Amino acid sequence: MELPFAESWKIKMVEPIRKSTREEREKWIKRAHYNLFQLRAEEVYIDLLTDSGTGAMSDRQWAGIMVGDESYAGAKSFFNLKETIEKITGFEYVIPTHQGRAAENVLFSYLVKEGDIVPGNSHFDTTKGHIEGRKAIALDCTIDEAKNTQLEIPFKGNVDIQKLEKALEEYCDRIPFIIVTITNNTAGGQPVSMENLRQVSKIAKKYDKRVIFDSARFAENAYFIKMREEGYGKKSIKEICKEMFKYADAMTMSAKKDGIVNMGGFIATDLQEWYDGAKSYCVQYEGYLTYGGMNGRDMNALAIGLDENTEFDNLHTRIHQVEYLAKRLDEFGIPYQRPAGGHALFIDAPKVLTCVPKEEFPAQTLAIELYLEAGIRGCEIGYLLADRDPLTRENRFEGLDLLRLAIPRRVYTDNHMDVIAVALKNVYDRRNEITRGVEILWEAPLMRHFTVQLKRL
Ligand code: F0G
């Protein structure tokens, strides 16, 4: 008999979590104005708000913390990190930053100016923010298939090459670079194929443009290439990573995801010109070049995390868990962005809460219901997050309205996944009784979802 699957690690340290009563949760969520960001973490039983900075470090990483070098300049920990990044990506120049958006800020300060157009595949919010904040435009060239949640294709995060070529033809002079997000978080943690990365690189060369990878979940992307793309089944994750980064000139990294650290990020490139251009912004915004925004100890932990998480067993354990949760949801017929993503499942809320009108925010309503049901905190990636049109000030209802259940790395067990699935099923079973959603009482002019105050209707 074939042995069943099990995790590629064992547990050395635990953190107790506490269940609450529905009555308590009713009180807490009301106090939080029905905004899950406003809850205290103690009021949450299973926290799926994000997979960012929430992973569990290994014993090796904790050991790395103890031997961190905190020298202001030239710290040994920096060189550990730099050598690891170079080994995995091939990039020679490294600038540490305090997290991913800081890497964007430093690099884009050098590269993006007013009137520019930056094509990419579903730019992440902060990436878009750093582009639009400089009065430039983030042009989405994701394949159309990504919008159909029920369509099952292996690389739903891909760039639409025709859309990209059209942009390059039309706006060539205004394009400072192309940015490809691996995996594509906004489209559901969906991977980008090696073939697609190759094509982007080829077309970029044709128009003499550079390519940046927003690499927060690059290791998970490499795992999907190994599992799904022809010709890669026998390659190691590290070999696949090396090949992926051959098709980029630089990367920005939120190390809080695939680096499995609680805080950190970096820029890496093989262009000395870009390094020289960005480095003064690093000194200005982050810190001196050999620590940027990070402690020596954290750079050590990150170097080890990157090495560990570019090994197959670790990634297999992780993505197997996300797929396990997806299978449980399939049993109950709960619709999500298919196939399961690398770091999260994205529930198609309007398909669940069919009676809640879009004006009353179905995904946020589902997030509240799931919290009330079992103390599980997900995150609305939908109409609230989409904000208002800057000109008309109307709500933007054109995109998807999803409830993201992001799974922290090496934190929860499959028993927790069962609780999540059954809690969601219980909400699903009474979906026809949920006919009203929420109304906005107060909202900030920008990035409203973090602080919005809502009323339950
Ligand atoms: N790029 C991607 C693809 C991301 O998902 C994130 C963060 C960032 C950049 C910014 O990195 O948070 O370190 O500054 N995503 C988190 C999330 C917040 O929940 O998806 P950061």
Image (spheres, grey):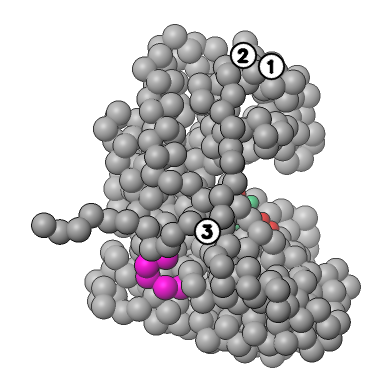
| Residue picked out by circle 1 | 27
User: x%, y% of residue 334?
Assistant: 35, 30
Magenta part mainly helix, strand or loop?
helix
The mark closer to the camera, 1 or 3, is: 3
Which amino acid does the dot numbered 2 rest on? Glu
Which amino acid does the dot numbered 1 rest on? Lys
Is 223 situated left or right of 305 in this image?
A: left
Q: Report helix, strand or loop for mark 1.
A: helix
User: x%, y% of residue 436?
Assistant: 54, 12
Closer to the chain start, of discs 2 and 3, is 3
Q: How packed is label 1: few (under 14 Cα within 10 Å), some, or many (20 or more)?
A: few
- For the point 47% across and 52% down, which residue is it? 343
Image quarter where ligand 1 lies = bottom right
**What's the mark number on residue 23?**
2
**In the rendered structure, does residue 184 fall within the stretch colored magenta?**
no
Q: Report helix, strand or loop for mark 3.
A: loop
- For the point 73% across and 41% down, which residue is it? 447
Which amino acid does the dot numbered 3 rest on? Lys
User: x%, y% of residue 444?
Assistant: 79, 34
Q: Residue 390 or 28: which is nearer the viewer?
A: 28
Q: Report helix, strand or loop for mark 2.
A: helix
Q: Residue 75 or 455: which is nearer the viewer?
A: 75
Q: Residue 66 or 446: which is nearer the viewer?
A: 66
Tag 1–tag 3 contact (CB < 8 Å): no
Is 439 situated left or right of 306 in this image?
A: right
